Image (spheres, rainbow, N blue to C red):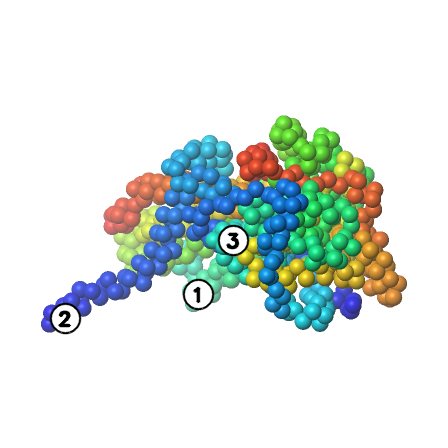
Amino acid sequence: MNKDFINDPAFLRGMTTRRIGRRDAFRLAGLSAAGLALAACGVQGKGSPRPTTSAQVQSEVEKYWSGKVKNGHVNFANWPLYMDPKQPELKEFTKRTGITVTYKEVIQDNPSWFAKIQPLLAAGQSINYDLMVITNGIHFTQLVRLGYLVPLDHSKLPNFAANAAERYKNESFDPGNVYSIPWASGMTGIAYNPKYVDTPPTKIADLWNPKYKGKVGMMADAQEIANFGLLLLGIKPETSTPDDWEKAAEKLREQRDSGIVRKYYDQSYIDPLAKGDIWLTMAWSGDVFQKNISDGTDLRFVIPEEGATIWTDNMVIPKTAENPVDAIMLMDFFYEVEIAASLAEYINYVTPVPAAQEVVRKHAAEATGEDKRLLEQVAESPLVFPSEEDYAKLHDYRNFTSTEEQQKFERIFQAITTS
Amino acid sequence: MRGRGLRAALTPYALVFPGALWLGIFFVIPTVVMLSLSLHSGNVTDGYVFTWNWQSYVDGITTYTDQIVRSLVYGFLATVIELIIGFPVAYWIAFKGGRHKSVYLFLILLPFLVSFVLRTISWQFLLSDNGILLGPLKSIGLIPKDMHILATGAAVVCGLVYNFFPFMVLPIYAALERIDPRVLEAAQDLYASKFQTFLRVVFPLSLPGVFAGVLMTFVPATSDYVNATVLGGTGNTMIGNVIQNQFLINQDYPVASALSFTLMAILLIGIFIYARALGTEDVLEVAAR
């Protein structure tokens, strides 16, 4: 793979603005989506129980996939800057299979994307995409619960079976990968600016230190902030109860009301951190790495002692997809070790294919100069290839069994961030 | 003759038709849909059903009283500050602008060629803790090291003032610009001092512009959510942010619609009272005196 892009100003610019694309704070684009959702206000939800036994899953799979054929084309909806703009992986896919790919970076954040596709899926209409990438969490669960996702035929996913790390084969949000396989993962931990912070933070409790009054950034997302409140109290987010939520909320309120929190950020925490407006903040793992590479800053990222959370962006096929066979072939293609390595080298998020590490090391050994240094950094980065020790500290998001439960959760924690 | 009479009778309707169609499709229908939605109950998974669910209004208003009041306060402050800054600017351009009036007006409008969000984000750079403004002041010790403007209510109000400024200046300018210079001469001929001329002639004649300016800044400033998102901190959330969250994050469409309607009602009542107190007719009366 050609590594010239690292010196390309457009690439660096892209890296600096990545999160603005990915988790657009203002969700402006989403407003028009809300209009769409409103227009469909008459449409009823179609909740269907998730199949519980493997026999049920098998019959669902057979029912869906029987008679489906390869059409030679696939429409792929992904997040901005989640692939090299030159799309070397997709070119290779087309060369090998003859399937052309229309790749669109149309997903800005989960809520607005969900608001956009929900009315169409509810009406059984095509959303014009055969493959999309959705983060585990509230919206993923809703898509499953509404029956909008295709159950995957694992006989068509040999590379996934062979190369995916075991942990990605039994994720709590989709046990047995009935509907999804991961695209990439990232962690939510603490980022700090060593220019202002003398003693590096090591635990979540450091975000409650009155010494940093007005200099701490927290996230506005209900799940992210809840996780930190829970972990602070030593509670595992994935198994937390409504009582735990109240306790965590109390802690978070305390932190806010004593003036320690400067602001609840959507995605825009990285620039204030670099400028010194905030000194330490909740952060996603990829951001710090990319900011340092693109702007030469010296920000640091730590996985706190109490633990951190890991989120996973997942490839899924919407129920109304026109080219599901082509889509599932593409999904499996990304689990070839060479392809997974090439992707990880560009996006710098956790790859579900551990064998890719050796390939990146090999590429690093072959490269020279600045490319070599960057590739070595990627190959040894715990944020791209976490060790078992790192993984042991990582927790999953809480999955909600009912909408009431989810709404209760959201109410509790949004009351903190929208004060 | 009859045909021509019919055509003449239909012409006004034909002329108003495109506008009415536009309003019907893009204002009336969405408003009705939203009103209906605000009385639905349910959730996105199970679907929404129309049930005359007034509870959404009760829930929305009781939960978010603080945010509603705060929005009105921020909107009011922004409008007053804009009026204080904007009136002299409009006055100066209208009466002292000379040949370059259009240049000055263009300068007022210039920031509007940049997207609203970008303009607001650029204020983050201006106001940042060690930025262009505070950095030098801190280094010479004029202000304490830990002082910050960003992430405060003041920053949000500043942003609102900046973003809606032309909406205040332009209507006032338009009103002042229309004043016949001979009226001013007449005032001076009748031995009015400059101050009296302003107070008894210029200012009353500018009131329709002030009225329009206040409406055009207060309404959008109160319902704005971008400034609070970009420039605010904890405890600066405005009602616009809440509505946006309810729509896009919680998908609680009934509460979001109920809040939108509540805001709309508050603003309409406010405008109505304001119009009665300083209504256009009264303004004309004042001007005629």
Residue matched to label 3: A121
Tell me: A419 left or right of B179.
Answer: right
Q: Quadrant of residue A196?
A: top right
Q: In the depicted view, which residue is nearer to us: A409 or B65?
A: A409
Mark-to-mark CA distance, 2 and 3: 53 Å
The residue at the point 47 percent across, 53 percent down is A123
Q: Mark 1 lies on which chain?
A: B
Percent x, y for residue A336?
A: 77, 60
Mark-to-mark CA distance, 1 and 2: 48 Å
The residue at the point 74 percent across, 33 percent down is A205
Residue type at mark 3 is Leu
* Foreground: disc 2 or disc 3: 3
Percent x, y for residue A225?
A: 65, 38
Q: Dot 3 surroundings within 10 Å: few (below 14), some, or many (20 or more)?
A: many
A366, above or below A59, in the image = below
Percent x, y for residue B260?
A: 43, 43
Q: In the depicted view, which residue is nearer to us: B34 or B140?
A: B34
Q: Dot 1 surroundings within 10 Å: few (below 14), some, or many (20 or more)?
A: few
Q: Which mark is residue B102?
A: 1
Residue type at mark 2 is Gly
Q: Which chain carries label 3?
A: A
Residue B90 visible somewhere in the drawing = yes
Percent x, y for residue B75?
A: 46, 43
The residue at the point 15 percent across, 67 percent down is B6
Mark 1 or mark 2: which comes first in sequence? 2
* Element under disc 2: helix
User: Pointers 1 and 2 in contact (CB under 8 A)?
Assistant: no
In this view, the residue farthest toward the right is: A365
Residue A25 visible somewhere in the drawing = no
* Element under disc 1: helix
Q: Which mark is residue B3?
A: 2
